[in-house]
Image (spheres, grey):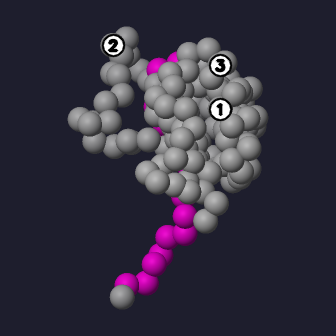
Amino acid sequence: MREVLTQGVDHVGLTVSDLEASKNFFVDCLGWREVGGKPDYPSAFVSDGTTTLTLWQRVGDEPADFDRHNNVGLHHLALKVTTEVNLKKLFKAIKKWPGITIEFPPDYSGKGPKVHTMIIEPGGNRIEFAFDPR
């Protein structure tokens, strides 16, 4: 067996179609903090205290819509939620947020006990919020 030389995720970089809308979603809707960014390559760094995301503004005028079936790369980002009550509170705030597409509301993943919801955030990335009591 090989020695494991990595230790978790340092950060995840997401290209977004609307940097301000994505940043505002994470900060104002989800309660994350803005922890940095680079104005010369438009970006914002946001964190929930455990996970850090770098949100990078897409360059160019032609939108490249997310296609989880055909694009290589990100299928979705899954974020842990601490309780089922918090998942429902989070979903209540998310469904009111402008620019959100709800793929499905909180429901069991398979037969459970994990409960999850899937959305597309205003910048175009597919995000899952999941609570697993195991």
Residue under the point 37% across and 11% down: 61
Question: Is the C-beta separation of discs 1 and 2 under 8 Å?
Answer: no
Identified by mark 3, the residue type is Trp
Question: Is the C-beta separation of discs 2 and 3 under 8 Å?
Answer: no
The tag earlier along the polypeptide, 3 or 1, is: 1
Identify the element where label 2 is drawn: loop
Picture coordinates of residue 59, whole percent (x, y) = 41, 21
Among all residues in the image, which is located at the extreme front? 111
Give the residue number, with chain letter if any, for mark 2.
62
Position of residue 86 in the picture relative to residue 103 (left or right)? right
The tag earlier along the polypeptide, 2 or 3, is: 2
Of labels 1 and 2, the one closer to you: 1
Query: Can you tell which quarter of the image residue 46 is in?
Result: top right
Find out whether residue 17 is within the magenta segment.
yes
* Disc number placed over residue 91 in the picture, else none: 1
Is residue 130 or residue 69 the one in the foreground? 130
Position of residue 102 in the picture relative to residue 86 (left or right)? left
Q: Callout 2: 10 Å neighbours few (<14), some, many (20+)?
A: few
Q: Which residues are magenta?
A: 2-18
